[in-house]
Amino acid sequence: MIQKYFFYALNILVKRYFEVRKLTRYKKRKIMGIVKFCALILIPLGAAFVGGKASEIRQAAEKLNNISLGKGGEKIVDIAAQPEYHKSSEKDMKDILSGEDILSEGYGVQEEKSDEKSGIKLESPLEMVSENAGDKPYPTQWYENGDVIRTTYGYYSGTSFFDLDKCGQVNNKTYWSNDDLYNESLCLPNFTISNTDEPQVLIYHTHTTESFEPYVREHYDTSFNYRSTDETKNVVMIGDAIQAELEAKGIGVIHARTIHDYPSYNGSYDRSRETIIPILEEYPSIKVALDIHRDAISGDGFIYQPYVEINGREAAQIMIISGCDDGTLGMPEYIKNFHFACSLQQQIEGDFAGLTRPILFDYRHYNQDLTTGSLLIEVGSHGNTLEQVQYSGQLIGQSLAQLLLSLRE
C-alpha cells in the first residue's frame, strides 16, 4: 500500500517536472528510470528494516528481473489469453498541435541500453499491449490456410539497375540515363544537421494501419487483410524503433502517429500532408521526413517474406523510394531527395549487408516536395513478422544516425 501511493505521488511530481522542463523522451526515461529504480529498492528495504521482514528484500530483488517472453508458433494462438503479456511503457502524453503527434515519445522501450550488434533493447511487439487498439485491433487468433514463402532478394541485374559507388543499387524507372543518375548519386545530401535539442527528423505514416505476420510460420491466415489500428502491431511500431535509435544518439525526433488510412484508404496522402505541414512549419529545424510503410508482395494463395539474417537475427529487407518529377508533380528539387536516398542506401547496406533492396527511383510524389530529405521507406512486406520489421527499424535508425552525425555542422 505504501508503494502504491508513493509511486502515484512520484508520477505526479515527475510529470509536473517534465511539463516545466522540455526534455527529450530519452532524457525523460533516464530520469524516470533512475527514480523508480531507487524507489523500488529503498521502499522495500525501509519496510524490511522497520517491520523486520526479510521477505520484503527478496521481493524487491525479484522485481528487478520481471521481464517475461511470450511464445508463438502454434497453429492457433490466443494472444489475449496469455497472462505474461504486459503493457508497454507509460506515455508522457505531451501533445503536438492536434494532440495526436507525440514529440520524442516511443512505444515499448524497456531499457536505454545498447550494444554494437542489436542497438536499443526493445520490448517484443508481440508482447506489447496497446492502451487503445482502436476500431480494428490486431487478431488474437490465427489460422493457417495460405502459404508463406520465405525468400532473400540478392543482387539485381537488368538495364534499369545500376550499382552505387560504395554498395547498394538503384532501380531507375525514369527518363534519366543510368550514367547521369549515377553521377547524381555521388552528391552528398543537400542539408546539414545542428547540435541542438530541436527535432531534426520527422517520422510519419501515410498508411498507418499497415500490419504484419505475428511470427515465422509456413502458412498464413487469408482472412486477415494485414491492417490494424493497434499501433504496437502496425508500422507505427517500426517508427518507434527508428526513433529510439536516433534519440539514443542525441538526434531529436517528432513521430506523428496519426492514422491516415482508416476508415478510408482513399485520400491517405492528402491527410498525411495535412498532418506534416504544420509540424514542419512549427519546427523548421527538421531536415529529414520519413514516411514509413510496408510493401505487399503476394500472389494467389501465397505471400512473400523477404528477410536477411544480420548479427544472428532475422530482419525484413527494406526498400527506399525516391520520387522523380516528370514536370507534372510539383517537385522541382526532387533530385536532392535522391542524393539523400543514395547516401542512406549506402550507409545502411554498408552497415548491414543484404538489408536493402535497390532504391526505387520512379515518377512518384508521396509528399516528397516538402523537404530535401523526404523519402518513403518500405520496411518488409505483409509476409514479414512483427519482430523482423521492428529489428529492421532499429537497423535503419542506427545507420541513419551515423549518416546524420556525419552531416553535422
Image (cartoon, helix red, strand yellow):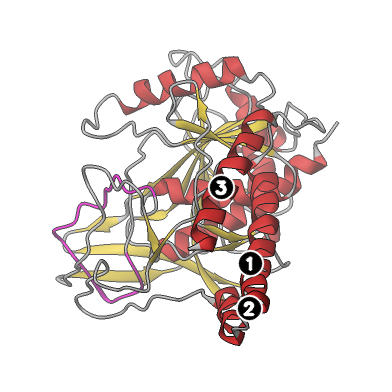
Q: How far apart are marks 2 and 3 (CA)?
A: 22 Å
Instruction: State the image coordinates of residue 215 (x, y, percent, origin top left).
Output: 35, 70
Q: Name the residue under label 1.
A: 43
- Tag 3 and tag 1, C-beta contact below 8 Å: no
Q: Mark 3 points at which residue?
A: 9
Q: Nearer the viewer, residue 74 or 22?
A: 22
For the question of whether residue 363 can be seen, the reply is yes
Say if 169 sits above or below 214 in the image.
above
Q: Residues within 10 Å of mark 3 (few under 14, many from 20)?
A: few
Q: Mark 2 points at which residue?
A: 48
Q: How far apart are marks 3 and 1 (CA)?
A: 14 Å
Which residue corresponds to the image point at 71% horizontal and 40% vertical from the top-left?
A: 251
Magenta span of residues: 214-231
Which residue type carries mark 1? Answer: Ile
Q: In this view, does 133 lie to the left or right of 406?
A: left
Which residue type carries mark 3? Answer: Ala
Instruction: State the image coordinates of residue 355 (x, y, percent, origin top left).
Output: 56, 60
